[in-house]
Amino acid sequence: MSKNTKVKVQLDPFQEWCHKWGRIGTVLALAYMVALPFVVLAYYNCIPSAGQVLNLGSLGILMIYIPVGISEAISYTPIMGSASYLAFITGNIMNLKLPVAVNAMKLSGKQQNTAEGEAVASIAIAVCSVMTIAILTLAALLGAMIAPVFELEAVKTMSNYLVPALFGSMTLGLFASTANGKKVVKNGIMGVVPVLIIVSILSLFVRITSGGSLFGMVGFLILGMLPVAIISSRIMYKKGIIKVVPKEEK
Amino acid sequence: MATMKQIATSPLLLAGVIIGLLYITLFSLAYFKKAYDRCLQFGMTKEELKSVIKSSAIFSIVPSLSIVIGLFTLIAVLGTTWSWWRLSVIGSLSYETMISSSIASIMNYSSAADMMANASGQEFGVIMILMSIGMLAGFFILIPLGRKLCTSVDQTSNDVNDTSKDWNSVLSGTFMLTMLAVYIPIILIGDTIQALVMITGLIIAIALGVLAAKPKLRWLNEFIMAFSMIGGMVSALLWTKIF
């Protein structure tokens, strides 16, 4: 086959189903989510003008979250694969859906970006979505009874450190997930060394100069660092520093 | 003209939210059924799948409880129905919490309670619309480009001698590693307590991994991430007292 011939990527029937029905289901859900406030407001004759919605204060908030949304779609979709449609429509990706998908793939020994891995991730995200809806429904119904527990200072403190705790628990799994069943990527971590160096220097600079953290800028940073990591990984792959080799049989 | 309180507690909004949540639940169940059947066809056993389901359910509890804390924060500002809707679907805890903490001042009210008591229906409409459109940006990438983003890193290959997808394997891992390479220095360098919480979680994960290697404790494998995450969060109580 000619090197330049474009080959249409053949996906597994499950992946095809997700890309078709996941997309349709997502569009329907989005249409409903956007329509709901307008229907309710129209009933009460309270629809605000565009000028009322898009004022300086609201635009400030939107300007922070538009890049975050774009960054999440670009960086997390390749990790969760065809399970992404469900993950995005049910929200809370970084603090819930992504770790639960990674945990499930690690537990079952399936690799991301394979049909098996994406099917397992879909099961995990579906279970997680239903669990979250059930827990929040219960909390909303029993609000007055259980609210005091969640207002305890200790519970609030623990909740503030969810993301660092998540990363502590995920780190080993992330480093281990570089095999696709029959092959293994060796030295993949080398591709992100420039990212580690850049972000470390930036973090150190911000900590020394202002005593603060770049935590609120993560979305922007991932978006900015992805091209750096991809180019660096490509160069190291071409130079043979990063290798893909057959997995040794046990 | 209706007030914020009337709309926030209206049966129409409640009915709309219930219908929406039923749809999302059905969507999740359809995904689940399709994925479950495909996993069986791939040769996975029902026992293996049961273990994935159990582990996912347990893993979901602690982060969901954090979202419950966000729910109670939001209820004080926006009432139960709208808060319940926003955190059950598309919304993100950080986005909704940020909106809830800043919305009253943006609307020129002295506090959330002042806003709930005195805001007009139109002002509540601004909040509802703003929250609904704020997280849409990602979908403008996901819906048209989702398939392309996935297939560009697809590494399914049955042949060990086929090297055509080797770069895909490298690229696929790069997204995960980049996320890690951005978060880890920020957590370790940016904040002492965050760093200690992360290290504690990591040490617990390693210790549980070692224990799970023993035949009698193999069941621990299902809970390593959940337990180490809970351990990391609990350790925050100690670290905040010391530092």
Image (cartoon, helix red, strand yellow):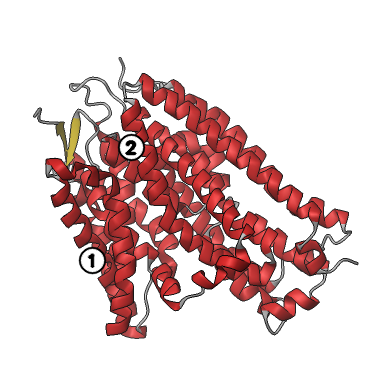
Label tally: 2
The picture quadrant where one finds residue B25 is top right
Q: Residue at x 22, y 22 (%)?
A: B162
User: Of the residues shown, which amino acid type is indicated by label 2?
Assistant: Ser
Q: Quadrant of residue B237?
A: bottom left
Inspect the image, locate mark 1, and give the three-letter code of the amino acid beneath it.
Ile
For the residue carrying disc 1, how many other residues have a C-alpha within 10 Å: few (<14), some (14-19), or many (20+)?
many
Residue under label 2? B51
Q: Image check: A190 left or right of B121?
A: left
| Label 1 or label 2, whichever comes before in sequence order | 2
Q: Chain of mark 2?
A: B
- Residue B225 placed where, x, y %? 29, 52
Residue B159 in the image: above or below residue B171? above
Residue at x 45%, y 73% (from the top left corner): A156
Q: Quadrant of residue B213?
A: top left
In the image, residue B197 above or below residue B159: below
Q: How far apart, in angstroms, are the residues tagged by discs 1 and 2?
A: 27 Å
User: Picture coordinates of residue B238 (x, y %)?
Assistant: 29, 77
Compare residues A231 and B68 and report the one nearer the observer.
B68
Residue B216 visible in rendering: yes
Q: Position of residue B231 (x, y in %)?
A: 29, 63
Image side of residue A197 versus residue B147, left or right: left
| Number of the front mark, 1 or 2 | 2
Q: Residue at x 63, y 58 (%)?
A: A141
Mark 1 — residue?
B199
Secondary structure at badge 1 equals helix
Pinpoint the chain carrying mark 1.
B
Measuring 80% from the left and 58% from the top, which residue is drawn there? B10
> Dot 2: what SS?
helix
User: Residue B206's spot in the image, x, y percent?
Assistant: 17, 55
